[in-house]
Amino acid sequence: MFFYSLVLVCVGLVSRGASAACSREFLQGATSAYLQAQAAGSPPKLAVLASNFSYAENDTPLDITKGVLSQPLIIDFSRSIYDTVQCATFTEITAATSPHPYVIHTRMLFNAGDGQATKIESVVTDAGDWAFNATGHLFYTRQETWDIIPEAKRDTRAVIQAAADAYLDQWGNPDHPVPLGTPCVRLEGGFYSGKNLTANTCRMGAFPQPLNVTNRRYVIDVELGAVDVFNDFPWLDQSKPGGATPSTNFIRVEGGTSSPVFSLLPSPMSLETVRQVQGKAAGDDGKGKAAGDGKEGKAKG
Ligand SMILES: *[C@@H]1O[C@H](CO)[C@@H](O)[C@H](O)[C@H]1NC(C)=O
Ligand SMILES: *[C@@H]1O[C@H](CO)[C@@H](O)[C@H](O)[C@H]1NC(C)=O
Ligand SMILES: *[C@@H]1O[C@H](CO)[C@@H](O)[C@H](O)[C@H]1NC(C)=O
Ligand SMILES: *[C@@H]1O[C@H](CO)[C@@H](O)[C@H](O)[C@H]1NC(C)=O
């Protein structure tokens, strides 16, 4: 179903010109096909995958027919962004009322020329993962309106990426300037930093040790002022080199060009979904407190 739809989308769009595979419409078609496949639990057929296609969940390469796409999910809410420059999409799925609740972040890459998928990777979180609470996530993400930003007020890709980078760089240096706007809130798993929608509660405290956040993979949507970064969250998982835990940060940026400080608006939401490897958690030794700002979401230990 997924790739059948994709094929139709590709045939329809590619015939109109070489760059059509990376039109916003093409990418919207691809994410809607992806959402349909996830709702149906029918993983993609291999027809329109590029020869170098790869699929991974939580940084582990996987057969796409064996992953979460093979389970039908009730998708209570989703939000997608479209990067026509990189021919990439990002989609957040909140499946809170599914028998098995999930919050999933997915990044898909396509060949600009022929629209074939070259990579799909997801951070798949469920019970036991960092601050996981799909009900809470659904409640807060639904409150956020991420409309298309009028053309004259849009930030450049560089400004949007710099906002996300500043946020992540601050994890390595608590004094690193992050020109956060107001309102600004973080939604970390199901934990919501805001007390109300007018406060700026995005600043992270210092971690017990500086975190060098590497392996950053961006999807940037200038029209929506949104960026998602897949990145390694270091130090949490002692079983991995550098303790890297797969993580993604979904951020809305507004007003970067029109004001000396730009709003880093996970206000909506910076969803920060930190995948915890089962049995490897930021448990009782104080690390969990730092990583989650201590409010809740003690991970499985
Ligand atoms: C897959 O191959 C295409 C060329 O067909 C190339 O442009 C693209 O970067 C490759 N993608 C990956 C993820 O290796
Ligand atoms: C999850 O979030 C909901 C909505 O905010 C809240 O009512 C509930 O208590 C939370 N559950 C846990 C286990 O924290
Ligand atoms: C919102 O929260 C901030 C920070 O806690 C507080 O200063 C402000 O008074 C609150 N505003 C309202 C309307 O409750
Ligand atoms: C973070 O790690 C990368 C890759 O190992 C390295 O190139 C970079 O210099 C490091 N940055 C900091 C601030 O330590």
Image (cartoon, rainbow, N blue to C red):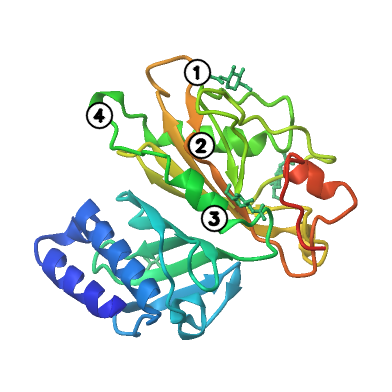
Residue named by callout 1: 261
| On-image quarter of the C terminus | bottom right
Which mark's residue is nearer the viewer, 1 or 3? 3
> Which residue appears farthest toward the right when viewing the image?
285
| On-image quarter of the N terminus | bottom left
Element under disc 4: loop
Residue named by callout 2: 266
Query: What residue type is disc 2 on?
Result: Pro
Q: Earlier in the sequence, mark 4 or mark 2?
A: 4
Residue named by callout 4: 150
Left or right placement of residue 152 versus residue 14 in this view: right
Left or right placement of residue 292 versus residue 217 in this view: right
Give the Cα distance between marks 4 and 2. Answer: 19 Å
Give the Cα distance between marks 3 and 2. Answer: 18 Å
Rendered residue at 44%/60% (across/down): 107
Rendered residue at 51%/37% (across/down): 266
Circle 3/circle 2 CB separation < 8 Å = no
Write down which quadrant ligand 4 falls in. Answer: top right
> Which residue appears farthest toward the top when viewing the image?
260
Q: Which of marks 4 and 1 is nearer the N terminus?
A: 4
Residue named by callout 3: 135
Q: In the rendering, at what x and y percent does residue 134 appear? A: 55, 57
Which mark's residue is nearer the viewer, 3 or 2? 3
Rendered residue at 40%/56% (across/down): 77
Rendered residue at 30%/50% (across/down): 84
